[in-house]
């Protein structure tokens, strides 16, 4: 395998410029349309304009998420590919387990995430050489070791690139304000992390940023399986 480039100390713009030169349209941003993803798309339009954008639409997103998605699409005049769960798998899950099976336990929740998120992501990455995320180390202890450039063994050893890995929340919001970017209005209502509507709530003062994800779970990692 070709040695990975050492981009840990490079800025997000330099990382994106490398992505553009190395992969171009064979790379794509996976966007769930929190502030990090909007910032990443904004930077990519200037530094890596060939990079594609896609989203995993679980069928249970907040209306505010669809709203900012449309605002981003219109602002940058870009195509946002939408990848959905396989209909038969989703029909089987809801028929056999019901619409709120994910609240019965961690394994049941992971099964739902597997059908609605993980499997569609696998299809979305077919044929790509790299994918980009808005992961930041500061977001949670589970993400504290996120690398700027990593090998995604789960998806055929393509590269997984996290240009904002070293960014703080303050930096991210400063970029949003400086460039007057559209953003998900749920952030103003106390949602630092936004996922499916039934699985996300606002956080309380002093709670961790991802405490509002699957809040009924007392233990375990606050991840859905997209970022192992």
Image (cartoon, helix red, strand yellow):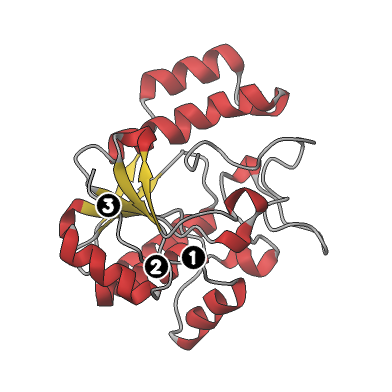
Q: Earlier in the sequence, mark 3 or mark 1?
A: 3
Q: Secondary structure at mark 3?
A: loop
The residue to which callout 2 is attached is 40
Determine which quarter of the picture holds residue 21.
bottom left
Distance between mark 3 and mark 1 Cα atoms: 28 Å
Q: Which residue is mark 3?
A: 3
CA separation, marks 2 and 1? 6 Å
Q: Are marks 2 and 1 in contact (CB under 8 Å)?
A: yes
Q: Is residue 128 left or right of residue 215?
A: left
Residue 77 visible in the snapshot: no
Disc 1 marks which residue?
Answer: 36
Pick the front one: 40 or 67:
40
Comparing marks 3 and 1, which lies closer to the viewer?
Answer: 3
Tell me the residue at 56%/77% (across/down): 173
> 168 or 202: which is nearer to us?
168
Identify the secondary structure beneath mark 2. Answer: helix
Figure label count: 3
Of labels 3 and 2, the one closer to you: 3
The residue nearer to you, when weighing 57 against 179, is: 179
Position of residue 171 relative to residue 207, above or below, is: below
Under circle 1, the secondary element is: helix
Is residue 57 toward the left or the right of residue 208 in the image?
A: left
Residue at the extreme bottom: 178
Q: Is residue 172 visible?
A: yes
Q: Earlier in the sequence, mark 3 or mark 2?
A: 3
């Amino acid at each position: 395998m070709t040695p990975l480039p050492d981009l840990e100390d490079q800025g997000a713009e330099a990382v994106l410029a490398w992505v553009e030169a190395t992969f171009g349209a064979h790379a794509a941003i996976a966007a769930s349309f929190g502030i990090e993803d909007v910032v990443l798309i904004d930077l990519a339009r200037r530094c890596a304009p060939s990079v594609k954008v896609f989203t995993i639409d679980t069928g249970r997103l907040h209306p505010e998420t669809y709203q900012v998605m449309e605002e981003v699409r219109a602002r940058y005049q870009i195509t946002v590919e939408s990848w959905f769960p396989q209909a038969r798998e989703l029909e089987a899950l809801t028929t056999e387990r019901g619409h709120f099976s994910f609240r019965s336990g961690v394994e049941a929740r992971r099964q739902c995430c597997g059908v609605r998120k993980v499997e569609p992501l696998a299809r979305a990455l077919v044929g790509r050489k790299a994918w980009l995320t808005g992961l930041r180390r500061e977001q949670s202890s589970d993400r504290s070791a996120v690398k700027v450039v990593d090998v995604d063994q789960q998806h055929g050893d393509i590269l997984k690139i996290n240009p904002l890995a070293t960014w703080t929340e303050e930096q991210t919001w400063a970029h949003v304000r400086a460039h007057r970017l559209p953003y998900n209005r749920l952030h103003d209502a106390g949602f630092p992390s936004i996922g499916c509507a039934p699985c996300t709530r606002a956080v309380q003062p002093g709670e961790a940023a991802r405490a509002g994800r699957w809040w009924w779970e007392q233990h375990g990692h606050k991840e859905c399986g997209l970022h192992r």
